[in-house]
Image: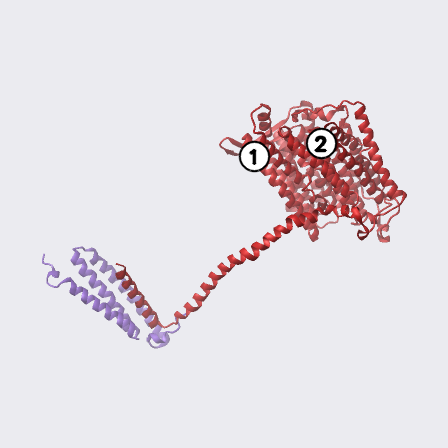
């Protein structure tokens, strides 16, 4: 079977996911809006998923792809919980700017 | 059947103890005392039946309950041995114990903790029976420690007085020193014989098995150190006079008649071992003689009625050790028995006096009591005559036998023993004259309340005085029932003193000596009517005696102070170093915490930043590490 990696080299996948990951990291670090931060986290997750899939194909090993399914399922659960928290925060503070969340200390 | 009876003998006082200690508070009036007395009386009745059985059959009753421990070729059983020696001991332990329990019902009547008193007293009898009945050294050791514990509890019975607590602690600690010796002795015997059973040890020795004489001597010496502690011999005797802090029945039972004779019991029990170590026997004889002399000389000038009796006890125990050291085990046992009678009677008599004087123990404030306390006086007089060694009282026979043996073996020891006996006669009659003769020297208030003690107190006195009077009959010179009775348990048969001129002369010397002592006391305290002066007026050698040769002070300076110094060294130097380290670590953690907590500032942005920074550094580290 013709391998997709012969058309587009593995290194391109690595660059892409690194880029996506960095976008996620900077998004988390520099945006104040909790929803945007949340999306950044999802970008990071997906960057990793992409890499996993790419290497799975590269190694001719389906385990990586199975792993990605789990990862996606967990991410879905996490999104549900995370969004619920955000809703709760919004109801209490009327905004979702994380700088207003100063109460998280002992 | 025998097993059940023996268990009843052993456990009756223990059951009494359990009831009194757990339910005693609810029992009213004299009930705890009656219960305690009945418990001990039960033991006495069983002992009596065993005693009659064994003295006619001459076969010891051996009771093997179960195996306690087994280590390769070394085995210890929970087993009891009721032979001639242990039954003799049990007879007077339980017999005198019953009388003293009875006495205590009246004596301790007003005490708020009377149930506790009887609980301890019963526990003591239980441990004493264990000590005597055991068929191996380990069981004896259990009893040995148990009686020490009870002695501690009872000396400090009036625990609200701080001095009494100190006296109790002193007794306990001094006993511990001896106990260590005893324990080491047991270990050595276990090593030598692979058994701690008396019968096994005896068989091994008598079958001529080769035993390293050095180790046998060391074992004997260690056991003797144990006996020194329990039986108040030099250098461990100072606890006994202080032990008088306990209630008087305790002094009579534990510190005169029974517990302090445990050392003599142990040595007699292992007489075949001590026969192997003549040099240790020499030490025992010398220690005994010197103790008897020193204690008697201290007793000459004491003013506390119980202190005089305490030093007298130490002195008499010294005489017993003298006999043991000379290999005359039967005679030592004989003196133990007669001493138990008359000394218990003397202590109980002094208790009766103290009772009448409302707690006053100083003889300088007594006097003239014979008019109001007839029974106490007469019984006291009989016992005093017995301890002074006048015929036909029991003390005469036993003391005379000891001195006679000493005369045949070692003349200097005989001289020391005789001098101690003269002193005994002197201080006992001094006590008698000061307490019962002349006029009353106490306050008017006390005089009004003087009375004879009730029947529960006088009855034991009468019984004991009778025994003190006739007790000598068990071993008359030339025709000794005791020697024959004890023959199976003692390996080396005692030599029979042929009653020749020398012996009668020695008897004469002893009697004259006693009369000299009595005469001196009479001249000083009746003719001159002198009364010992106040503490500050005592001078010269009398002051040294009055202060007990400053032995306590010397011990304090030589042992207690250096140990305190060592303790304060460890406290000030070592502990400071260790605690400095520990506290330093604590402070470090504290500082780290205080500084570290500012990191948690509540800003999520900062946390995330730290988070990413952390991941980045981990990645960098992983790559660099490669």
Marked residue chain, label 2: B
Residue B526 at what x, y percent from top left? 88, 43
Quadrant position of the N terminus of chain A in the picture = bottom left
Q: What label does residue B323 carry, if any?
A: 2
Height in image: B238 above or below B269? below
Farthest residue, direction right = B527
Colour red maps to chain: B
Farthest residue, direction left = A2
Label 1, residues with CA under 10 Å away: few <14, some 14-19, many ≥20: many
Residue B108 at what x, y percent from top left? 74, 46
Nearest to the observer: residue B580 or residue B118: B580
- Same chain under badges 2 and 1? The reply is yes
Farthest residue, direction bottom = A94
The residue indicated by pointer 1 is B188
Residue B16 at what x, y percent from top left? 66, 41
Q: Earlier in the sequence, mark 2 or mark 1?
A: 1
Colour purple maps to chain: A
Q: Can residue B29 be seen in this view?
A: no
Marked residue chain, label 1: B
Q: What label does residue B617 carry, if any?
A: none
The span from disc 2 to disc 1 (Cα, nearest Å) is 25 Å
SS class, disc 2: helix
Quadrant position of the C terminus of chain A in the picture = bottom left
Residue B284 at what x, y percent from top left? 67, 34
Height in image: B331 above or below B437? above
Nearest to the observer: residue B419 or residue B224: B419
SS class, disc 1: helix
Height in image: B382 above or below B491? below
Q: Can residue B200 be seen in this view?
A: yes
What residue is shown at x 88% (from left), y 47% (from top)? B439
What residue is shown at x 67% (from left), y 42% (from top)? B236
What residue is shown at x 79% (from left), y 25% (from top)? B502
């Amino acid at each position: 079977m013709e391998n997709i990696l012969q058309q587009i080299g593995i290194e391109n996948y690595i660059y892409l996911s690194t880029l996506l990951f960095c976008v996620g990291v900077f998004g988390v670090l520099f945006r104040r809006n909790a929803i945007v931060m949340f999306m950044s986290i999802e970008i990071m997750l997906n960057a990793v998923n992409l890499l996993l899939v790419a290497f799975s194909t590269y190694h001719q090993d389906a385990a990586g792809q199975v792993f990605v399914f789990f990862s996606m399922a967990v991410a879905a659960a996490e999104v549900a919980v995370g969004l619920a928290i955000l809703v709760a925060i919004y109801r209490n503070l009327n905004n979702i700017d994380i700088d207003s969340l100063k109460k998280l200390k002992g | 059947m025998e097993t059940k009876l023996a268990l009843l003998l052993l456990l009756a006082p223990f059951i009494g103890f359990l009831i009194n200690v757990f339910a005693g508070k609810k029992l009213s009036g004299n009930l705890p005392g009656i219960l305690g007395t009945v418990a001990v009386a039960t033991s006495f009745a069983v002992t009596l039946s065993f005693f009659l059985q064994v003295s006619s059959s001459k076969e010891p009753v051996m009771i093997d309950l179960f195996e306690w421990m087994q280590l390769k070729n070394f085995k210890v059983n929970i087993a009891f041995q009721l032979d001639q020696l242990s039954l003799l001991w049990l007879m007077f332990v339980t017999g005198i114990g019953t009388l003293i329990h009875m006495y205590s019902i009246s004596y301790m009547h007003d005490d708020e903790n009377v149930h506790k008193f009887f609980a301890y007293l019963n526990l003591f009898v239980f441990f004493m029976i264990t000590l005597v009945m055991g068929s191996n050294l380990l069981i004896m050791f259990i009893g040995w420690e148990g009686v020490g514990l009870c002695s501690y509890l009872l000396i400090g019975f009036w625990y609200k007085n701080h001095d009494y607590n100190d006296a109790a602690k002193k007794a306990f600690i001094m006993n511990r020193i001896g106990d260590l010796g005893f324990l080491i002795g047991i270990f050595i015997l276990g090593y030598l014989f692979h058994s701690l059973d008396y019968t096994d040890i005896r068989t091994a020795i008598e079958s001529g098995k080769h035993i390293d004489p050095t180790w046998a001597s060391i074992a004997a010496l260690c056991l003797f150190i144990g006996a020194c502690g329990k039986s108040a011999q030099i250098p461990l005797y100072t606890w006994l006079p202080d032990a008088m802090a306990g209630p008087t029945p305790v002094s009579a039972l534990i510190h005169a008649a029974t517990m302090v004779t445990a050392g003599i019991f142990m040595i007699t029990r292992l007489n075949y071992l001590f026969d192997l170590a003549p040099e240790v026997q020499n030490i025992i004889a010398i220690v005994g003689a010197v103790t008897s002399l020193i204690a008697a000389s201290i007793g000459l000038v004491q003013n506390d009625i119980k202190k005089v009796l305490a030093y007298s006890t130490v002195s008499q125990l010294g005489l017993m050790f003298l006999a043991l050291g000379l290999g005359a085990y039967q005679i030592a046992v004989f003196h133990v028995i007669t001493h138990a009678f008359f000394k218990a009677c003397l202590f109980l008599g002094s208790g009766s006096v103290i009772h009448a004087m409302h707690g006053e123990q100083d003889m300088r404030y007594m006097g003239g009591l014979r008019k109001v306390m007839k029974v106490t006086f007469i019984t006291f007089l009989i016992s005093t005559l017995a301890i002074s060694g006048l015929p036909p009282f029991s003390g005469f026979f036993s003391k005379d036998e000891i001195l006679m043996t000493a005369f045949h073996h070692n003349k200097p020891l005989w001289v020391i023993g005789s001098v101690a006996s003269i002193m005994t006669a002197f201080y006992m009659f001094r006590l008698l004259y000061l307490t019962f003769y002349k006029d009353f020297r106490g306050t008017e208030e006390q005089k009004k309340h003087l009375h004879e003690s009730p029947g529960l107190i006088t009855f034991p006195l009468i019984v004991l005085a009778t025994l003190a009077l006739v007790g000598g009959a068990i071993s008359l010179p030339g025709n000794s029932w005791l020697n024959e009775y004890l023959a199976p348990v003692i390996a080396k048969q005692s030599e029979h003193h042929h009653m020749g001129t020398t012996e009668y002369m020695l008897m004469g010397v002893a009697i004259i000596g006693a009369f000299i002592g009595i005469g001196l006391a009479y001249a000083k305290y009746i003719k001159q009517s002198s009364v010992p002066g106040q503490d500050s007026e005592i001078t010269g050698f009398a002051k040294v005696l009055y202060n007990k040769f400053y032995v306590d002070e010397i011990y304090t300076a030589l042992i207690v102070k250096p140990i305190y110094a060592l303790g304060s060294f460890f406290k000030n130097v070592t502990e400071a170093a260790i605690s400095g380290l520990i506290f330093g670590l604590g402070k470090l953690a504290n500082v780290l915490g205080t500084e570290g907590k500012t990191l948690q500032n509540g800003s999520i942005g900062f946390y995330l930043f730290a988070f990413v920074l952390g991941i980045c550094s981990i990645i960098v580290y992983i790559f660099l590490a490669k």
